[in-house]
Amino acid sequence: MATIHQARCSRPALCAIALLAGLPAAGATKGDAQSVTILGAANSQLADGASALRAGHVAEGLRLTLAGLNEPAELRDIAAGHANACAGYALLKQWDEALDQCNQAIGLDNTNWRAYNNRAAVYSARGLFDLAIHDIETGLGLAPNSETLLESMRVTQRNKRIILDRSHHSVPS
């Protein structure tokens, strides 16, 4: 997970994306948790895709993940693969594809807090902060001590305030 320094993250959508994939944004430092789910060796393409995404090789990670989703795997691994594909598409700013993948992940396994975190980042990048906060709250219900989710909540609430402040300042009086 990327720990975003609040004062330095001037582009809310990019901060949300950095949190989503556990990648550093400008002014960010590496933390200990990742939003990409690492899988076992049962489906090597899903596992290799997750590793590539975590290493920042987004196109390759997405390619491997999508190929792995076409191979037999445990239901939980398939759900995690869709969550990873969501992260990959979001990093490429392909929001519709990202949202579809997150929805599939949650539909298959509604106990994966990372899928909720990923979908929250997509919602946040689209300016849908209330939906993002709802997903983060759902994730926190599953993993109440997740530093990733707690940081996602802080960033999302901050970005919502920034957007609201900008809209109030841009309205003529």
Image (tube, rainbow, N blue to C red):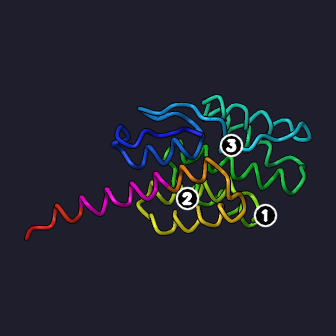
Label 3 or label 1, whichever lies nearer to me, is 3
Residue 173, placed above or below residue 32: below
Q: Earlier in the sequence, mark 3 or mark 2?
A: 3
Q: Which residues are magenta?
A: 154-166
Residue 109 location, x and y as percent?
78, 62
Residue in view at x 52 percent, y 33 percent: 24
* Mark 3 residue crowding within 10 angstroms, few (<14) / some (14–19) / many (20+): many
Residue 117, placed above or below residue 43: below
Marks 1 and 2 sit apart, C-alpha to C-alpha, by 17 Å
In the image, what residue type sits under mark 3?
A: Val
Q: Which residue is mark 2?
A: 120
Residue 81, placed above or below residue 55: below
Is there CB contact under 8 Å for labels 1 and 2? Answer: no
Q: Earlier in the sequence, mark 3 or mark 1?
A: 3
Label 1 or label 2, whichever lies nearer to me, is 2
As drawn, the label of residue 100 is none
- State left or right for residue 9 relative to residue 140: left
Residue in view at x 47 percent, y 33 percent: 28
- The answer to if 163 sits in the magenta stretch is yes
Q: For residue 168, which quarter of the picture? A: bottom left
Marks 3 and 2 sit apart, C-alpha to C-alpha, by 14 Å
Residue 34 location, x and y as percent?
66, 40
Is there CB contact under 8 Å for labels 3 and 2? Answer: no
Secondary element under disc 3, as helix, strand or loop, is loop
Q: Quadrant of the N terminus?
A: top right
Secondary element under disc 2, as helix, strand or loop, is helix
* Mark 2 residue crowding within 10 angstroms, few (<14) / some (14–19) / many (20+): many
Q: Which residue is mark 3?
A: 36
- State left or right for residue 88 relative to residue 12: right
Residue 55, placed above or below residue 100: above
Q: Which residue is mark 1?
A: 108
